[in-house]
Image (tube, grey):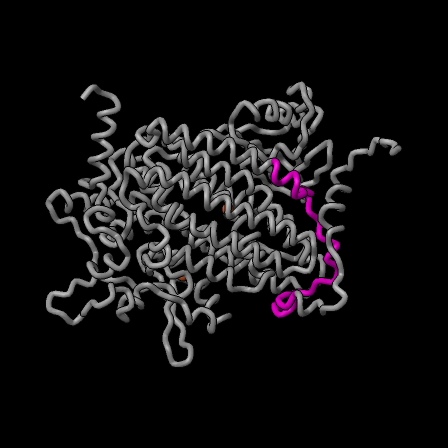
Amino acid sequence: MSTVFIAFQTNEETRPIIEAIVEDNPHARVNEAPAMVKIDADGRLIVKRSSIEERLGREFDLQELHVNLISLSGNIEEDEDQFVLVWKN
Amino acid sequence: MDMQVAKKKLGLKEKYQVMTRDLNWTPTYQKMEDIYPYVHYEGIKIHDWDRWEDPFRLTMDAYWKYQAEKEKKLYAIIDAYAQNNGHLNVTDARYINTVKLFLTGVSPLEYMAHRGFAHVGRAFPGPGPRVACLMQSLDEMRHFQTQVHAISNYNKYYNGFHDFRQWHDRVWYLSVPKSFFDDAITAGPFEFMVAIGFSFEYVLTNLLFVPFVSGAAYNGDMGTMAYGFSAQSDEARHMTLGLEVIKFILEQDPDNLPIVQRWIDKWTWRGYRVLTLVAMMMDYMLPKRTMSWKEAWEIYFEENGGALFRDLSRYGIRMPKCAETIRFEKDHLSHQAWCTFYNYTAATAFHTWIPTEDEMQWLSAKYPDSFDKYYRPRWEFWREQAAKGNRFYNTTLPMLCQTCQIPMLFTEPGDPTKICYRETDYKGMKYHFCSDHCKEIFEHEPEKYVQAWLPVHQIYQGNCFPEGTDPSAEGFDPLKAVLQWYNVVHGRDNLDFDGSEDQRNFAAWRAQATRNV
Ligand SMILES: [Fe+2]
Ligand SMILES: [Fe+2]
């Protein structure tokens, strides 16, 4: 199966985001590189707004992800509540 | 009295609809083909521009908000880095040469990308791609400006930074990235999008930015890390635009497939050839390495690119043809490139060096099938010669590939001991190539590539000397004259790192920073 990934800068803003992704995607693998965290997952990866908000204790707009985003792969499906990366094969 | 009615906040989809598509109108007193003259001649057929999907649905107001936040973060770090003499915290001064290569080779391309996206955004009749291209055009201007700001700090202390813009236009190895982008920007709007938006941004950009930026982080260069990550944060959007372009074009008409496939084959190869500079940076120029070029290629091209092309196979797209050649070259590319620069460093605006014993061990471990057999013996020989006072600087000019403009340094697929030469005749002239792929690209559009400004040819024609130079004068030194025309200072900007002013200054300043002298 094809791997999708998302990579963020390592900092205080991304820590709760990464924690949320790890919890919502039990099949994901976390790779830490210098100053960067890359999360790989087979087929599909979901980022849920509610899980991030729970950790942050405030409202979160998924477009805020862009501020600390480094790279990603996969087709993107996004709405207000979730951001999904997926390969359709 | 007006009643205040609480309006429901628009959802992402509706907001995007209102703030992009609804700003578009159909002209009544001008013809569409007069307003958009470039959309047909490449042969791409588009029937319905409204089918364009922008998965991020970013609107201009949100765009400004998030970009402003990125800039504030970035400049806070750049200021702190400068105030704290951060440049003295890099692993060793050899590292700074990677920043020189980046500023002279890559940053001017950011500016060209700004121009390119502004141009193609104007050329597309659909509001969706037009807004996306406008945002990318602004991003690219930001990348160029922030890189120049961040790197200008190095120019206060080190050589090899002082005339980067002119070098990009004149210096022989910089014609490689320059001609790559000039080639893209002089293509039609759809080809530009496939070239830069898809092949470069989606397929190859991870290989440029991720290793370079984590390399900077690993080597203590916070300034470069900051602008690199800031630029990269726009990259997810650029990559997505590139992928959407491909899907959109392919869904519009089956006749588009062979045109797009040819562009993917061409531009993956063109982009890969430019990345030769990144390969040698990763394997030879970073004092502390993150991963080898070969490993980066396997993760970001073979694995991720593999997934991407499997996904696109539902449209009939296949892996770029050059993937097989590249698979063979991955064991050799960085070594052949750094050997060449070590030879020609009298004519470069950065320093080179022989890898240390530790570094050679790292190379042996990362390249078990090639380093000890083909490249270690060369380095040991050159090291021996240098120790005896026979450091050889090659001052003759190499033959260049007509398409990628790289010297003929690559070897035959399957035989790393034999240089690969290809040639073709066109209108009574002979043209030379580094590979089958570069030859094929030329043969498809010879009228374009016969116009290439090849640095070596230009030097031989006498076009690269300061005004008033007399090449027939007694004792004429062509290299000296070319360096003057470049504005590269001989003995300061070029030659070995060992014995350079950069090396001496860095050692002295670092000593001052750690001792009471
Ligand atoms: Fe850029
Ligand atoms: Fe070539």
Residue B313 visible within the image: no
- Residue B146: x %, y % from top left: 45, 41
Residue B238 visible within the image: yes
Which residues are drawn in magenta? B36-65
User: Would residue B435 be found to the left or right of residue B458 on screen?
Assistant: right
**SS assignment for the magenta stretch, majority:** loop
Q: In this view, does B376 lie above or below B3?
A: below
* Residue located farthest toward the bottom when viewing the structure as drawn: B428
Please count the marks in the image: 0
Ligand 2's image quarter is bottom left
User: Would residue B253 be found to the left or right of residue B478 on screen?
Assistant: right
The one nearer the camera, B220 or B293, is: B220
The one nearer the camera, B165 or B309, is: B165
The one nearer the camera, B403 or B41, is: B41
Q: Which residue is drawn at 13% across and 49% down?
A: B390
User: Would residue B20 be found to the left or right of residue A38 on screen?
Assistant: right
Check residue B37 for magenta coloring.
yes
Q: Is residue B317 above or below residue B228?
A: below
- Residue B64: x %, y % from top left: 61, 40
Q: Residue at x 72, y 69 (%)?
A: B31
Q: Is residue B235 above or below residue B447?
A: above
The quadrant in which the C terminus of chain B is found is top left
User: Would residue B244 be found to the left or right of residue B405 on screen?
Assistant: right
- Classify residue A42 by image quadrant: top right
The quadrant in which the N terminus of chain B is found is top right
Check residue B358 for magenta coloring.
no
The one nearer the camera, B279 or B24, is: B24
